[in-house]
Amino acid sequence: MKLLVTGGAGFIGSAVVRTAIARGIEVINLDKLTYAACLDNLASVADSPLYHFEQADICDAGALCDIFARHAPTHVMHLAAESHVDRSIDGPDAFMQTNIIGTFQLLQAARTAGVARFHHVSTDEVFGTLGATGQFTETTPYDPRSPYAASKAASDHLVRAWGETYDLPVVLSNCSNNYGPYHFPEKLIPVVILNALAGKPIPVYGDGMNVRDWLYVEDHADALLRVLSDGATGRSYNIGGENERTNIDLVRHICALLDAKRPKDTPYAKQITFVTDRPGHDARYAIDPTRMRTELNWRPSVTIEEGLGKTVDWYLENAAWWQALQKRDGVGVRLGKR
Ligand code: NAD
């Protein structure tokens, strides 16, 4: 296998690249290097003979054609996307360009090159929102509610259409919220850890009762490589950790971990501040991962308690990584702005 990963300098993509290379897979990382990218995430593999990097925009058909011709990848895993819901509300243009047009251009390039597999990485947000009960399955109707979710839903439809119409050997996965090392400082869990450590307010949207289903990023990378190799062509797989938590419970748990690992006079939870809710904020997401378990024999390796412990330790031990990113304009201030 020669694997072309798009978005490999991002949070999940870099976990995929590190894991794939550790397993002996040759990887071409194609990334535009937007604000969300960080090549430091790949420092451990940058010198590997299995690793190649191409800076390119997936919307650029000419660049894609050139990269496919030079590297001749057999497999594609497509993660490049604009990924932050709040940014999609403030400025949806880049989301439509990259997530829809970029996916279209990548499908065309993969079809022309004749790859053996095209794995599209998507989100459970395409399914909309749940009430107090139930879970998203692979047959749940699409009902995206934010510009980000709508753009990802559109890209999922394009991928299925290219599979049906052009026999491109596609496979799709839709995953719940990820967390773990190298998570960009604008996302909820890093914001909580870093604002707590800085003595700043820890913003929580609305009443904090929104429920998310959390998955440790390294478990997601493992699941993605399983879908890539063993998933049935044309099929989609819901990936989740069966770890539903309300946002406020999650934030309190992280505060308690910090109280134990980096004690100070006042408990960190005192910094929690409720802020005006995100417009159209989905109430609850929950993934039914039965297909991953029964068809692909995949299970997450860590519980959410273990994963959050590892994540807090990683942020405490890797201050140089997040301090460098915080110096970039506008990072770490999105949550709580509206
Ligand atoms: P991220 O924002 O951390 O990384 C995205 C990467 O894509 C960045 O390195 C960026 O430079 C690159 N990129 C953006 N636009 C590009 C373009 N036009 N051309 C080439 N590269 C471009 O995202 P993430 O959180 O790692 O998410 C990766 C994928 O997984 C996305 O498709 C996202 O929709 C999906 N997903 C994410 C989550 C999550 O919790 N983070 C959950 C489910 C699915």
Image (cartoon, grey):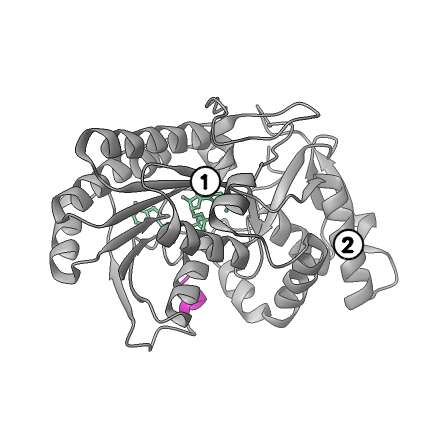
Point out the residue furthest to the front here: 294
Task: Count neighbours of disc 2 (C-alpha within 10 A) and say few if under 14, some if 14 to 19, many if 20 or more.
Answer: many
Q: Is residue 287 visible?
A: yes
Badge 1 is on which residue?
Answer: 237
Kind of residue at disc 1: Tyr
Nearest to N terminus: mark 2 or mark 1: 1
Question: Does 175 appear above or below 17?
Answer: above
Q: Does residue 138 appear to the left or right of 112 in the view shown? A: right
Count of numbered circles on the image: 2
In the rendered structure, which amino acid carries the disc numbered 2? Cys
Residue behind label 2 places its C-beta within 8 angstroms of ligand 1: no
Q: Residue 201, position in %: x, y?
A: 73, 47
For the N terminus, the image quarter is: bottom left
Between the residue at mark 2 and the residue at mark 1, the CA separation in whole angstroms equals: 33 Å
Q: Is residue 44 magenta?
A: no
Q: Is residue 243 above or below residue 158?
A: below
Q: Quadrant of residue 10?
A: bottom left
Residue numbers of the magenta segment: 37-42
Residue 141 in the image: state x and y as whole percent. 47, 21
Q: Quadrant of the C terminus?
A: top right
**106 vs 278, nearest the viewer:** 106
Residue 238 vertical placement versus 319 (above, below): above
Q: Is residue 58 above or below residue 130?
A: below
For this rendering, which residue is in front, 288 or 21? Answer: 288
Q: Which SS does the magenta portion mostly show?
A: helix
| Residue at the image position 45 percent from the left and 31 percent from the top | 149
Disc 2 marks which residue? 255
Q: In which quarter of the view is residue 44 placed?
A: bottom left
The verdict on residue 41 being magenta is yes
